[in-house]
Image (spheres, coloured by chain):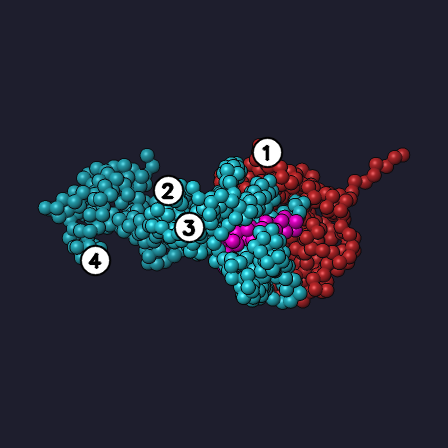
Amino acid sequence: MSFRSAALLVLITLLCCVTPAEAAKISDVVETGTLEQARRFFSLTDNSLRYALFGSILLGISCGLLGSFLVVRKMALVGDALSHAVLPGVALGFLWNMTKDPVAIFIGATSAGLFGTLVVGWITRTTRLKEDAALGLVLASFFAVGGCLVTMIQRLPTGSKSGIDKFLFGQAAALSSQDVTLMAASTALTVILLVLFYKEFLVTSFDPVFARVTGMPVRLLQELMMLLLAFSVVVALQAVGVVLVSAMLITPAAAAYLLTDRMHRMLILAALFGSLAGVVGAFFSFLGNNLPTGPFMVLGASTVFGTAFFFAPRHGVVPRWWRRRSRGNRISRENTLKAIYRVLEDRGFSDEGVTLEELSALRRDTLVEIRLQAAALAQNGLATVDEPRGTIHLTPQGWRQACAVVRNHRLWELYLTNAAHYQADHVHEDAERIEHVLGEETVRHLERRLEFPHHDPHGRIIPSLREFDRYDAQRAPEKPSGYRQQ
Amino acid sequence: MHDTPRPAPPLEIHDLTVAYHRKPVLYGIDLEIPPGQLVGIVGPNGAGKSTLIKAIMGVVPAASGWIKIFGEPFKKNLTRVGYVPQRESVDWDFPVNVMDVVLMGRYGQLGLIKRPSRRDYEIARECLEKVQLLAYADRQIANLSGGQQQRVFLARALAQESDLYLMDEPFAGVDAATESAIVTLLQELKNRGKTILVVHHDLPTARSYFDMLLLINTRVVAFGPTDEVFTPELLQTTYGGRLTILSEVIQQVGSSAR
């Protein structure tokens, strides 16, 4: 929480250092080399560049914060509809006195956006249409009206230089000091209100009925949230554009959602990702001499999301795949260990080592396969392979694991026949799967339940804890003896 | 000479009617719940059980009639009412952990803007202990079983430290262990003088769990001590023609009454 307040303070201080109306607009600058441009970007000497950068950071923060609430409330489409619905307001604000007056446009756009959400509510209340259809309707029709108005303005004698077309895809370089002040005010308001009413917004988002029952002004809070949302969409328009502002609401928040399980962390991450995307957008737009900012910002945000999608530790695709793969490897190793145990058992644990041929006969696998399996065991320190003699020898650790998996298998078989009344010839398949997932806790439980059994349903001895620790058992002539009272 | 005025009952409902799209769901409900009782609300699907709970809390508007909580309108006695909603009413993927949810029970007492204090955390921990979930305090709520999720809601209601509890199907879809844990908890609350209303959908257990039963089907069919209300005749009236499901239970009641 305090992190965000601190970040905001820093930003505001930085903004105060900006002295307006000094340097030329970025658009007036003649074309220079890419490296030179990059150097200029990072040296921050250019005032309008500073506006563009701070503006982009500010919009990233407020869109990330509010977007987080949209995402967890499954209201992503609302952001989309709202951002499209503001366009006629932008045009009307411009027509008010035929200049790009930020205040007039702010008022026009905010009212158009809020009016759009009102219409959505009205349609859902009075017809059978559900919210998604109503949102789609409002989004399209408002945007169409806006499109007509914008075209009309551009046909006007003064229109072509109005810069109103910049509202479609955004142009951070066109931000004026007044625009940035407005953005700072709106972002500050958002941050302050979210910090003050964090717990209220949290509970109304999670469980609105409960929130209402505990006396929270749920309706008021929801309207406040919509108002803040309208503000940040409107101030972001100039930099990202109408078409893509909803992406700045959703994408950073969605990336943050994949990375954490706590709301406050999600908010901080989303604000961070949002401003990062903002900087990326401003940078590339500047580098390419005033390319539209919006698409670059959204690409930046999408890259963050893509990274989170693939690499998020818990929910990411790659870590999940990795976990599945390593589980698969473990299961395969355990199966090899089990086969080695079986070979040893069949000859009464009389001799050291198991030959690859014996193993291949038992597992009905080719020698090549068996060699690979043996290598996997050796790699994990579970066995050593005596290449010249072609034998595998379990290490103490390998022996313990082999005992454990055989015990799991046989205990489970016994449990199924004794407690769940399965037929003895039905239990093997099931035990093949369960043996790899039984935890120690469950094993203890099974043992107690089955009264420390000696034999599985097929008459084989279930290795007990004593066998586990007796690595010599492989060499000793004495057979493992199952559970015995000490 | 001076009779001390009788304290206001935890819940008093007078001529309550609730309608959805002009079709009455509850009609002319009169009710007075005495304090310190564990009351089961029983009735067929669509009988208005959940609606009654929501109407009491003003979440569903009443078409007519009034409701008083300890002699006052609900709005004035918010903090004296604890609520356990149906488990499906929230998104369990929401980015909060168990502790966050239980702390929400303290929000009503805290009022606006104020943050939970150390004392609030203490209370939340105690409530988690009571539902045997303290070990799960840091878990994200999606990583819980259905029964555990239900107990999180219960702990949140406990954290409200209310005098009247309204619970909407707390036994729905929970495992046997959770069910018995909830029953113990309800008994304990009752013994501390709390009044508890529980919407319940399972007739056989309703008989053993509750002191009093409210049989409801748009109208109040019967309200009274379980022994008096749980009769074949009244159950038949409540459930109307839908006897196929219930004939067994009713027969059991009949035979055990002999």
Dominant secondary-structure state across the stretch colored magenta: helix
CA neighbours of label 4 inside 10 A, class few (<14), some (14 to 19), many (20+): few
Q: CA distance from mark 4 to mark 3?
A: 76 Å
Which numbered tag is attached to residue A377?
Answer: none
Q: Give me the residue at 21% from left, 37% from top.
A: A472
The image position of residue A85, as x and y in percent, is 57, 60
CA neighbours of label 3 inside 10 A, class few (<14), some (14 to 19), many (20+): few
Q: CA distance from mark 4 to mark 2?
A: 31 Å
Q: Which residue is mark 2?
A: A440
Residues tagged 1 and 3 counted as in contact (Cβ below 8 A) = no
Q: Earlier in the sequence, mark 4 or mark 2?
A: 4
Q: Which residue is mark 4?
A: A364
Quadrant in the rendering for residue B221: bottom right
User: In this picture, which residue range is highlighted in magenta?
Assistant: A219-246
Q: Which residue is mark 3?
A: A29
Tell me if B59 is positioned left or right of A178 in this view: right
Amino acid type indicated by mark 3: Val
